[in-house]
Image (cartoon, rainbow, N blue to C red):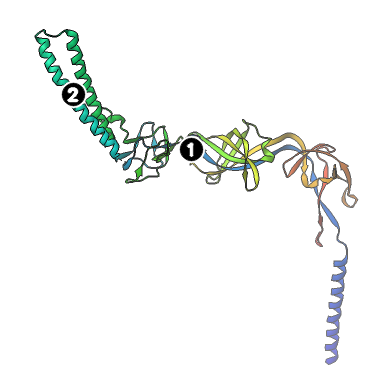
Amino acid sequence: MKKYSRAIVGAVAALAFIGTFVFLYQKSRPQPVVYTELKATVGDISKTTIITGKIEPRDEVSVKPQISGIISEIMKEPGDRVEAGEVIAKVKVIPDMSQLSSAQSRVRLAGINLRQAETDYSREKELYRQRLVSDEEYDKVKQAMEQAREEMAAAEDALQVVRDGISRDNASASSTLIRSTIAGVILDIPVKVGNSVILSNTFNDGTTIATVADMGDLIFRGNVDETEVGRLAPGMPMKITVGALENLSFDATLEYISPKAVENNGANQFEIKAAVSLKDGGQMRSGYSANAEIVLAQAKHVLTVPESAIEFSGDSTLVYVAGGEGKERTYVRRSVLTGLSDGVNIEVKSGLKAGDIVRGPQQVATDGN
C-alpha cells in the first residue's frame, strides 16, 4: 500500500514540475507585436477653444435716492419687472437742521415782505381810485405785491421740500418716491424698511436702493489666454453652454476684445464680450457660470487620420502605411505633409490618399490572440 502511495505522490510531483516548466517556457517566449490599424478618411476638422465666464445683462443700473432719509416702504421684490418711472420704494425725509432753519427763515422774511407789499398796494389802490397817482405808479406797486406773493409761495414750497421731501406743486414728481430709471427686471434690493439712505453727491456714491437690468439683452463675459487671442476677431460666432441649464445652448457673437491684458493666476488674459441670442422659453439669470466654445480655425472636406498614427522626427512627419495580408503584413514608412489638428485627428495635405491603412499605436498580443 505504501508503495502505491509513493508512486502517486511522485506522479503528482512530476506533473507539477512539468506544468511549471511549460508555464515558464511559455512566459519566456517573445510575444508577437500587433498594431492598431487606422484608416485615412475625408472629413472636417475644427480647432476650438473653451472660454469660461458668466452671463450678465448688458445694461445694469443702480437706482439711488435723490434725498437722504429712511426707507418707509418697499413696493417691489427682486425678480419683479418694472417700467421706467415705476415706483420701487418710498423714503421718509430726515431734514438737515441747518437747511430747515434757513427755509423757515426764508418763509418768515417772505411773509414780512408780503404783508408790507399788500399794505402798500392798499394805499396805492385808494390813491389810484381818487386819481391821485398815475397808472404807471399803480402798476408798479401791484406788480411788487404779486412778486411778494410768488416769493412767499416759493419759500413755503422750499420749506416743505426740506421738511417733507415733497411740496404741493411737485407731489407727482416727489423725490421721496424712488423710481426705476429704466424698464427691466429688479435683480436686487439691498435695503430694508427702516434703513437709512443718503443721496449721491461729490463725496459719496449714495445708497443703492435697487439694481435693475434688461434681461432681454445679455452678454457673455470671459477671459481668453494670450496664446489664442490673436486668432479672435469681432463678429466670430460662439456657442454658449450654461452648466445650470442642461441640454440647452445659446448662440453668441463676439463683440469686444480688450486691448489690454490682465494677469490671472500668473497668466496674461484678455477680456472678451459676446452678445447672447436667447431662445424662446430660455430662462436666463444674471451671473450664471457659462462656457463659450469658439472655432479658432477649421478645414472642411480634407483628408484626415488620427493623430496617434503620426510620428514626428525632427522636422519630418511620418506615417507607416500597411501593405500585404496576414503574416505577410508589412508597414512602409512614408513622409506626409500635415495641416490643422483638433487634438484627435489631423489633416494630411499630401502623402496619403483616402482609404489608405496606416499603423497606429502598438499592442502586445495576449495568449488568447
Task: Say whether residue 74 is visible.
Answer: no
187 to the left or right of 11: left
Residue at the (53%, 40%) spot, across then down:
55
Kindly report the distance in space between the C-alpha atoms of the residues bearing marks 1 and 2: 66 Å
Report crowding for label 2: few under 14, some 14 to 19, many 20 or more residues within 10 A (C-alpha). Answer: many
Report crowding for label 1: few under 14, some 14 to 19, many 20 or more residues within 10 A (C-alpha). Answer: few
The residue beneath circle 1 is: 281
The residue beneath circle 2 is: 114
Task: Say whether residue 341 is visible.
Answer: yes
- Residue 165, horizontal then vertical, whole percent: 29, 35
- Residue 161, horizontal then vertical, whole percent: 28, 33
Out of 3 and 198, give the one closest to the viewer.
Answer: 198
42 to the left or right of 331: left
195 to the left or right of 214: left
Q: Report how many numbered discs are placed on residues in the image.
A: 2
Q: In which quadrant is the N terminus drawn?
A: bottom right
Q: Earlier in the sequence, mark 1 or mark 2?
A: 2
Residue at the (29%, 36%) spot, across then down:
99
171 to the left or right of 49: left
Q: From the viewer's perspective, is residue 193 above or below residue 20? A: above
Amino acid type, residue under disc 2 in the picture? Leu
